[in-house]
Image: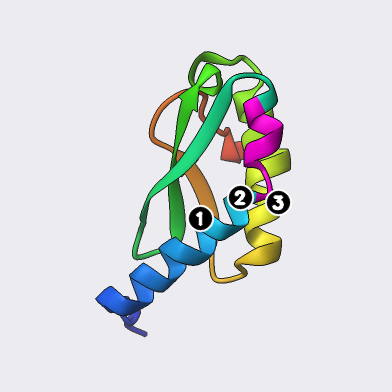
Amino acid sequence: MEKKLMSVEEKKELLLKVDRALEDLRPHLAVDGGDIEVVDITEERVAMIKWLGNCEACSMSAMTLRAGVEETLRAKVPEITGVSPVNGAQIDNSEA
């Protein structure tokens, strides 16, 4: 079965939903001098995020990504199938 590609409008809408969902996390990240932004949504509906400020080099960013960002996005934007950072720590999905 062939997967239907996202339209430009669908992608814009998903980017907006993800950005809104991230608003709930930003104050917690800001406490430690960090932030997060969504840079893209892949055709597989994976949110590509970028760590900003202190989050970029933080040793806890992988845990924050899994326990905070991924959980929040899956709950608030169920269309999202995963989250992947373009910088900073990566998630090891082999244990998921």
> Which quadrant holds the C terminus?
top right
Percent of width and height locating residue 3? 35, 79
Q: Position of residue 45 (x, y in %)?
A: 44, 63
Residue 63, placed above or below residue 2: above
Q: Earlier in the sequence, mark 1 or mark 3?
A: 1
Q: Is residue 95 visible?
A: no
**Label annotation for residue 51:** none
What span is in magenta?
24-30
Q: Secondary structure at mark 1?
A: helix
Residue position for label 2: 23
Left or right: 32 as drawn, with respect to 5: right
Give the residue displayed 46% in from the left and 53% down from the top. Answer: 47
Is 78 situated above or below 86? Answer: below
Residue identifier under label 3? 71
Where is mark 1, residue-wise? 19
- Identity of the amino acid at label 2? Glu
Q: Secondary structure at mark 3?
A: helix
Q: Are marks 1 and 2 in contact (CB under 8 Å)?
A: yes
